[in-house]
Amino acid sequence: MHILFADDEKNLQELMRSELPRMGYTVTVCPDGLTAVAALEKEPFDCLLVDLDMPGMNGIDVIGKARELRPEIEAVVMTGKPSQETAIAALRHQAFDYLTKPCRLADIAGLLGRVAERRQTKRQLAALQHRLKRAEGDCKMVGNGAAMEAVRNLITKVAPTESSVLIRGETGCGKELVARAIHDSSLRAEQPMVAINCGALPENLIESELFGHCKGAFTGADAARTGLFEVADGGTIFLDEIGELPLAMQAKLLRVLETGDIRRLGDNQTVNVNVRVVCATHRDLEKMVEEGTFREDLMFRINTFEIHVPALRERTEDIVPLASHLLCRHRTDGGSEHLFTPEAIAELKSHQWPGNVRELANVVEHAAILCDSLPIGTEHLPRHFGRRQLRKELRESEPMTLREMEMIAIERALSRHDGNKPAVAEELGVSLKTLYNKINSAEEKKLAS
């Protein structure tokens, strides 16, 4: 740490000038408050060690000025005249600690060690927040088509309320993104949002994950655990794939949603939590109710307000803006235009996207890795991408001969590779000679007809 020490006692100045470097710190020593403020204006310091009673400017004023210049600085107050008033003043200026003179070097060393630990904790927290932001990804909802505008309008209406929301849509279409948009636009935006994939939780651990448990509640419960409903207290809880919950858990969840009371496994006491519930599913809950696999009363409880997220194939006008947005996560060497060739755009638009936006994100990431310089062409798209699209088209087309299907595959591959026959042969898994034979045979058939 780089420490600024300000005190008008010369013997203390010399002591700190010699001893703080021995403790592993760099130090700048100032004889008064005005000199300390001038030093703060010139260079950054990690810690301010300041006497309260100095000529010109007292220690509290120095701390106040330091907070303006370096908000992240840690301040430690030293005084030979301790009083309740000075202690309160120091706390009001968010001083880290308060030392009474005379103090031992060991006390100063211990205190500075705690300051260093606190600064390290702050750095780790900032790093974790950065990683969390990257893991969550950009929460921007991309797309200006009518379908997405309708979704945005619904979010705007329901977000400021406390109503529970059910988000429906196919897997990978962006239901969690909608849930985050609801939370970020709500009155709970500054509180936590906890997302849970109900389908990914083992059945024997679901209750413990959601509501927590006491030590010894079951075999392996070596310590108490706070449930995710308590973690989300004051904020929003997002129950993704709620249709995957077992019936027994559905009953317990319904009680929590109706009363706000949770009970940890192994505990006789209930805890009240205040959470807003947002759910999502790709399942047909009405059909599940008819089949007896989903509780009708729970469906009514979570379905106060419904938002349907359209599949990507239902909003083809958003495919290129989405692909460009996703590409910017991985590449910074392109402008806002000409990120994809016209042929690549045609391939993207003609695909049916059974995996929706999640599939598009994977395709774009693959292409970004493979492409040395933008724009991305058809040759950078995954090999299975074109083949899967071709299989779908063949299933939906009129009956064809094997030769006709082969030529469709060859023509598609030639287009993707700009006529590069060795690359086409490698993709299709045939020898170059076989490829030439098939092309020549098709051309001869055309001439003959």
Image (spheres, helix red, strand yellow):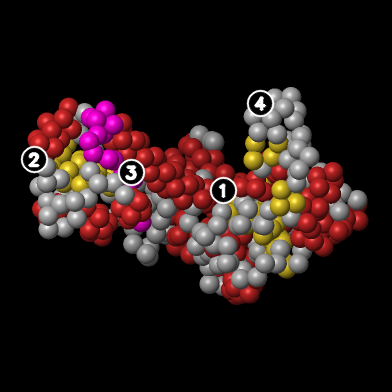
Query: In this rendering, is residue 377 above or below 320?
Result: above
Residue in the picture at 54% in, 40% down = 428
Q: Is residue 403 visible?
A: no
Dot 3: element: strand
Asked if marks 3 and 4 touch (Cβ < 8 Å), the reply is: no
In-image side of 431 versus 251 (left or right): left
Using the image as rendered, state which of residue 81 and residue 139 is in the foreground: 81
x%, y% of residue 212?
A: 69, 40
Which of the two discs, 3 and 2, sits closer to the camera? 2
Magenta stretch encompasses residue 383? no
Q: For residue 222, which numbered disc appears in the image?
A: 4
According to the picture, the residue beneath numbered tag 1 turns out to be 385
Disc 3 and disc 4: Cα gap in Å?
Answer: 36 Å
Dot 2: element: helix
Quarter of the figure with the N terminus = top left
Residues in magenta, as a range: 92-108
x%, y% of residue 43?
A: 15, 50
According to the picture, the residue beneath numbered tag 2 turns out to be 10
Of the residues shown, which amino acid type is indicated by label 2? Lys
x%, y% of residue 375?
A: 38, 56
In-image side of 257 versus 148 (left or right): right
First in sequence: mark 3 vs mark 2: 2
In-image side of 400 versus 59 (left or right): right
Q: Is residue 84 visible?
A: yes
Quarter of the figure with the C terminus = bottom right
Using the image as rendered, state which of residue 264 and residue 395 is in the foreground: 264
Which of the two discs, 1 and 2, sits closer to the camera? 2
